[in-house]
Image: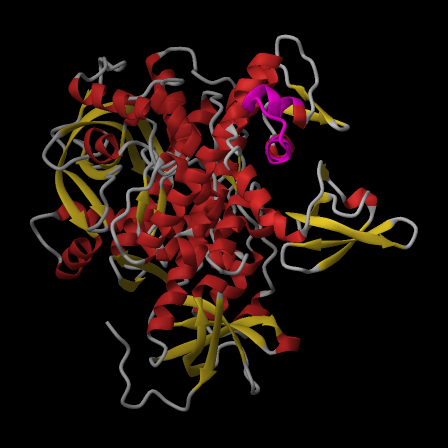
Amino acid sequence: MDKGTLVEFRLNGNRRLAVVDRPEGKKNWIVVDDRGQTHTLHPRDVTYKASGHYQPRDISSFLSQAQSYLDPASLEIAWELLTETGDSIDPASIAELLFSSQDPPVCYAAHCLLSDDRLYFKQKGDRYEPRPSSQVAELKHQTQMEVQRQQEWQGFLQRVEYALAKQPVEWQASDRPRLEALERLALLGDEATHRAPALETLVNLKRGETPQAAFQLLVELGIWSPHENLFLRRSQIPVQFPSKVLDVANTYLQSPPDDLHRDRLDLTNLKVYTIDDESTREIDDGLSLEYLPNGQQRLWVHIADPTRWVLPGDALDLEARRRSTTVYLPTGMISMFPAELATGAMSLVQGQICCALSFGIILDATGAIAHYCIHASSIKTTYRLTYDDVDEMLELGVQGEPEIEALHHWAQLRQLWRRSQGAVSIQMPESSIKVRGDHITIDVLQDSPSRKLVAEMMILAGETAARYAQQHNLPLPFRHQPQPELPPDEELMQLPAGPVRSCAIRRCMPRSETSITPSRHASLGLDTYTQVTSPIRRYSDLLAHFQIKAHLRGEPLPFSAVEMQELTQGVSTTVQEAILVERQTNRYWSLEYLRRTSGQVWQALMLRWLREQDNLGLVLLEDLGLELPMRFNRAIAPGDQLTIRVSYADPRQDIIHFEEVPSRADQVAPC
């Protein structure tokens, strides 16, 4: 290069022009820019040389002249002219073609256009070749998509800003992938897939790239609640019903399908009691007492008959199979069937004639089943009672409803009979947690006479159904439980009676299982047992109804033994997931309740050691029916009473710490 040559080079990625001043060593050159600053360049650093002789003061004028030709749209004209021949071209030729000039500033402008172009031309050495039309079309499409992506990104950030400022926002369809990425990161952390959009959002908002940061952002955006149920979201439990299923339900409500049982036994003359919690909406069982001419009494357990509305393999059945169970959460339930059917046409609604599967049972003097019959029936619920109603009636000995007293008598006799057969009774308090808005209530479910009455009648119906299925070789989801290996009586008797002893027995109880083969259920004291009393809420019960009703009609069974085994296994897996979500959710809200009442003092009972070497035990908060871990700093033994309060609680992290306090003086537990 000669002194006075105008050259282009890159400085920090930006174009710079300078004039060659002198050589530096064997290969380098000293150049001077328009600011008078010197730069040392190797020949490979030079990206363009303009013809002519210049001074550094000429650079500004040179750039000004070139600027007027820097229109990228002009390249498309050149491309259209050259694409047919495919000839390569250099900047000087482009300058002549487009601007009819090869003046140095014009040639430099052509160089800038070509070297910056990523659409129409590709560089080959010092020359440029026009790209094929198909390639240009694809590059244009990619450019348009990138422009659209940037527009959507900026729009998304603007809507995020509005939402964080608590202004109303209407999220767009293009926002959904970014919001879903945030949800995946908040739910799954490092295991989340396609995390890039979430991380990009968090980085742009100068927040941490963590699941906690994603969760907090979703809360601040108003998309999630501060108490969002992450356990439910991580599960496969469907929350909404497909529109197809809702359409079928609405069609059936407007035009009921034909009843396959045209010869239902008319039991509308019987007085029918349904006994549930006041909040129960799926009424799936009722009780009657029939006085027979020979002086005997027949117990009737009426079970709601959803198979009146559902056929094996139809849309309602397949959706119920997918769900497998109604999920009960403190914030509400997720039904197995659409609510319009589950709480309406399928339920045993007071005052309405309803379809049922009725179990008529005569017990002998010991409480064993002496005779039974099963019928598809029509009934009419006379009274809808709560457990409290029945407890009060039993306590007062209401003369107008002698059937209630008789049902109670048979339930007591039945319980004694099961105990004689080896049934294991575990009396542990249960809590009912309800969340309404921002209000949490925890009630202890007392093991009252009414609850025992209903429980015994449901167990009785289950034994009856299992006997019928075993007698007629029907494959059903039989429930069974291996015989537990309990501690010796002398060892159990050393433990305080009540929750401590029951807790020790409970630890020894093996998990009950489901199969199509009848087998003994140890804790119930029954040689055969199945569940049939909640077909609106449990799919395994619905399967039993399908099989029993088909046999009653004299028709082929809808499910073979192989099919029933496969269905039973699939349902069991889904139900276990639902049970886990219920437990996790109840645990979260119980810790949240204790966090909110952290100043409250509670009476607790030491149940057992979790890790005695770490002084970690399990305590029962007697006022709430909650079992929670506690670390002790003194000698203590199962059965000891203590007074405690929460020292720290973090429901989201599943952490609860208690501290022992001297007494509960002048402190009262909330109602």
> Is residue 313 positioned above or below 571 on the image?
above
**Above or below — where is 13 with respect to 467?**
below
Residue placed most toward the observer, 400 or 666: 666
Q: Looking at the image, how many numbered discs can be counted on the residues? A: 0
Classified by dominant secondary structure, the portion drawn in magenta counts as helix
Q: Is residue 434 above or below residue 519?
A: below
Visible in this render: residue 187? Answer: no
In the image, taking residue 109 as reference, residue 543 lies left or right, namely: left
Q: Quadrant of the N terminus?
A: top right
Name the residue located 62 percent from the left edge and 48 percent from the top edge.
59
Is 164 or 109 nearer to us in this picture?
109
Residue at left 56%, top 46%?
Answer: 61
The image quadrant that residue 539 belongs to is top left
Which one is nearer the viewer's eye here, 652 or 453? 652
- Specify whether 627 is left or right of 612: left
Name the quadrant of the C terminus.
bottom left
Q: Is residue 642 left or right of residue 89?
A: left
Residue 106 among those drawn in magenta: yes
Residue 572 in percent (x, y) is at: 50, 37
Q: Which residues are magenta?
A: 93-111
